[in-house]
Image: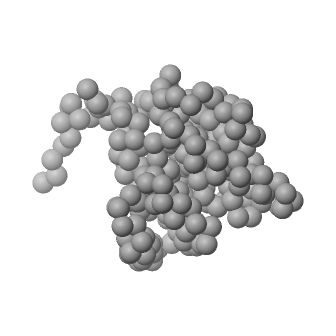
Amino acid sequence: MTSRPSPKNSAKKNVSIAAYRGAQFEISAAKLTQLPADEGLEVAFAGRSNAGKSSAINKICCQKSLARTSKTPGRTQLINFFTMDEKRRLVDLPGYGYAKVSEDIKRRWQQTMEQYLATRESLQGLILLMDVRHPLKDVDQQLLAWSWNVGMPTHVLLTKADKLKRGAAQNTLLKVRKEISENDHEGLTGVQLFSSLKGTGLNEVYAVLDGWFQLNQK
């Protein structure tokens, strides 16, 4: 028989989810000089264009339109900050790998994002989103290699898990975990299935984010 969570643990989880539900848009930044003050705790969401970053943020925050979503890849061209409270933020980074813009603009986006990731002191971890049907593309592996090189905790969401049958999704999960474990010698990277549509893996994401954001700690 499955045991029920204790009232104490349930209360903690409710407090945690409430923190995400209270998230509000703060600012969009096109360059580093426009970023909010580098203080508190931040978690950034990165991934190829159309990997589902905005949808994931909306699902995590139990809101429908906190982060703008689009069927057109590459729409997110700015670094978007969402404030949870006076100490914590979620950050939606520009999607990479597709956007129908000039090469000059692509390079500028990439430079700005790389500088943010390399210099932001308040950054606690990176959520890296990959379409479960097309994981570990070259650009994904480059970002993973960077995170391992600098010691950045990273959690991979294999998004759109509802697009595959359960067995196929689990096989992809195991393959990605195996490939990452062969290169992530410090054990910095977690991997899970996720679906913004079905809510698959949502509790796993909360557990990771709660740790990075130091929620429910005395």
Q: x, y (%) of residue 82?
A: 59, 33
Question: At x 55% / y 68%, what residue is drawn?
Answer: 141
Question: At x 61% / y 72%, what residue is drawn?
Answer: 138
Farthest top residue? 86
Q: Is 213 drawn above or below residue 167 in the view shown?
A: above
- Residue 3 can be seen in this image: yes
Answer with the quarter of the image where residue 19 lies.
top left
Question: At x 41% / y 36%, what residue is drawn?
Answer: 213
Q: x, y (%) of residue 210?
A: 37, 39
Front residue of 124 and 25: 124
Q: Is 86 drawn above or below residue 98 in the view shown?
A: above
Question: At x 70% / y 38%, what residue is drawn?
Answer: 32
Front residue of 55 and 29: 29
Answer with the quarter of the image where residue 163 lies.
bottom right
Left or right of 53? Residue 124 is left
Q: x, y (%) of residue 92?
A: 62, 44
Left or right of 81? Residue 201 is left
- Residue 195 can be seen in this image: no
- The quarter of the image holding the N terminus is bottom left
Q: How is the image coloured?
A: one colour
Front residue of 1 and 67: 67
Q: x, y (%) of residue 43?
A: 50, 42
- The quarter of the image holding the C terminus is top left
Q: Is 152 drawn above or below residue 212 in the view shown?
A: below
